[in-house]
Amino acid sequence: VYLGWKHFKEQEQAYTLVPLVKGGGSRVVAMPLTSCKTDIYQTCKNFFFPEGNSIFGNEDNMLFSLTNFKGEKVEESIKVGREYIPFNLCNYMEAHKIRTVRLYLQSRKIDGSDDDDDLLSSAFDHDLNQEGSLIGPYLERQSLVSRSLLHQNKTIKEYQESLKADERKAASRERENEESKRKKRIQNARADRVVPEPDDEFVTVKVRHITMGLQSRKFPKTSRMAAVCDWAGSLSPDPENFTIYHLRVVQKPSEELSDRCTYLMVEEEHGTPGLLESDDEVQFWGFGTVSKNNNEPLPDLNYPEDEDVQEVDSCLDHYYAFILNDSDSTALCCEEQDSITFNGDNNEIFRDYKTTAEDVRAQPGVPKKELRELLDGLAKEIAYTSISKFNISRSFVWEGAERALTRKSFCAKNKMSVKFTDDIGNSEGAVDLGGPMKEFFTLVLQWMVTSQLFCGPEHHKYISFQSTCLEGNDYFFAGTLIAMSLVHGGAGPQCFAHNMFEALHRVPDKVAITIEDVYDRELQSSLEKLSNSGVLDLAGMLQPTQTTDDIRKIAEMTAKWFVLGRARPALESFLNGLSTLGVLDALTHNPDVFRPAFCYYPEKLTAESTENLFQVFQSPVGSNKAVTESLVLSRWHDYLQDIEEGEDSLTFNDILFFSTACKVLPARKIYPTIQFLHHPEACGEKSRFPKANTCSNILYLPVVHTTYEA
């Protein structure tokens, strides 16, 4: 009798042959012809469930049945004709007219669960080797045993690799937990150093936190920048290391606080710059673990010169502990140098703040990159899988832009999706694939440069100071939109005065301003007419003068205060917005490259440059369409020449805007093309007017006109 074993697979909902390596396989045994169903059951269990166990569990947890090679269940009786006779091997062979009996033990777990995936098909196609033994010759049995050992070794190896992977994950989680606890200890130590918020005699300070956004708090008037650093660092465990900037100048802990001033937090990789060892105005608090007394100052550490400073086990952040391990920390900070001009009675008409470090400049000898290359590099940060939506009405473009920028889901790094609506709110169908976005940037930049955010002549703009705009964060929004326009493929403002652009990447006090730069003509005229006055009352200062040179200096300082000094809060907010997507940092390192995007240069499009701007897609040479397109192109070139000669009211910028939604060439290169309207429209006729796809920068020219004048 050939005996086999099938086990039920829940995944496949079927009985599957169990291979030899799992205790199954094909077994051949000699049995008496009088053997009944119970005898066969017991023989199968002896083979496949030795001592009542198998790879799938104990026999007590199984349901068993006996089937033939067709999968039919073997019952206690066999039907022969119209009669039923008891089942035994002899009657079974006679009833089915067979000489070889093949039977299968079927098993199924009572709970129906089974996770084995490696059941293999079995075969009873081997010859009998000897009674009660495995089927097949000796070499085949050896091969089966070898495969079984290989399978076991593979299973052991996979288990060991899985165990190592689990150990690595556990170690990684442990490191993350320890890192989180360490950052939390630093945060708690900073929180313990935060001074209480006063009710009177205070200054209000704002910090643009990296993870928490814009935060505001009151500090005592006697507080220094160290208190702001403690407070900003206590708001969140991240960033661990940071520097506080004001107008791109690092603020030292001993700096005095300015009322209603906004500071910028910038994450640092290796900790914040150290303090001066001679800075006696700063006390070091919070040294040691949080559980210890955090209100004790640091002890004096008098180490021998030839002995290295040992690392101190503490939760003191890098901002204060830096000087303990770096003997050259004084080289990282420069003393602030102040030059005060014209001191009055307890008043200072102007303080020329020097920077604490040299202005950032490109290294000599390093080739400068083009603006397109710099912006393409910044554009790599754009996540095209995420979308920031802008729902814009052309009549209220700034209102729609403000709503989009203040939405919780907004992120400047997301791909922009601009949808224009008409004045009554019905969709125009201008869903953004690139064209509406460029049109939006064109419209919003045009609105900004003509709004109260900027003042001065058309191509000589300065940032204004409007308290309502400052409170509404409009200057920050303006900087953000300009940065996004440059990186997302739009144009720059191209209207800033060169002095205004200098203030973007240098400390404003170092920018030279003359009386001629005063955009208020009445004030400019008054300053020009100043002559031999003994006393001058301007800009809230009372300053006696002795010579005409003194008057001239006061007039120039007044001009500088009017153009840049009074607008410093607005400029600071604008720069914070311009830092979006890394634009301000790139501008600071490459000011000359970015200048054409911000300042006006009288460079106009010409017929030749417009012709070269568009790439023409023509039909195959020799076709009828190609002949027609050649005629249309000759008329197109004539039309461009007519515009250049002033015979048409349109301009080249109008054509550029119609084709690409950009009124000027953007900083990032575009590739507009010309195609032809050969196919009929829905009405059945070919178009008589040019069309454009601003998403793909395609200008479509009609081909139906028989004459140039038509």
Image (spheres, helix red, strand yellow):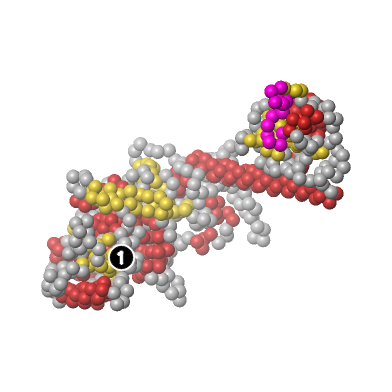
How many numbered dots are placed on residues in this image? 1
Residue sticking out furthest to the right: 130
In the displayed structure image, the side of residue 652 where residue 568 appears, left or right: right
Residue matched to label 1 = 666
Rendered location of residue 198, percent (x, y): 38, 38
Q: Is residue 72 magenta?
A: yes
Q: Main secondary structure of the magenta part?
A: loop
The front one of 201 and 189 is 189
Residue sticking out furthest to the front: 81
Residue at left 14%, top 65%? 525
The front one of 230 and 407 is 407
The front one of 505 and 407 is 407
In the displayed structure image, the side of residue 704 where residue 273 appears, left or right: right
Residue at left 39%, top 52%? 414
Q: Amino acid at mark 1?
A: Pro
Residue at left 53%, top 51%? 318
Q: Is residue 263 magenta?
A: no
Residue at left 85%, top 35%? 30
Start and end of the magenta stretch? Answer: 68-83
Quadrant containing the C terminus is: bottom left
Task: Kindly tell me whether residue 534 is visible in this rendering.
Answer: no
How packed mark 1 is, by other alpha carbons closer than 10 Å (few <14, some 14-19, many 20 or more), is some
Rendered location of residue 82, percent (x, y): 69, 23
Rendered location of residue 369, percent (x, y): 41, 71
Find numbered disc 1 in the image and state the secondary structure of the residue it sits on. loop
In the displayed structure image, the side of residue 631 where residue 21 appears, left or right: right
The front one of 532 and 383 is 383
* Quadrant housing residue 452: bottom left
Quadrant containing the N terminus is: top right
In the displayed structure image, the side of residue 539 where residue 161 appears, left or right: right
Rendered location of residue 678, percent (x, y): 24, 66
Task: Kindly tell me whether residue 505 is visible in this rendering.
Answer: yes
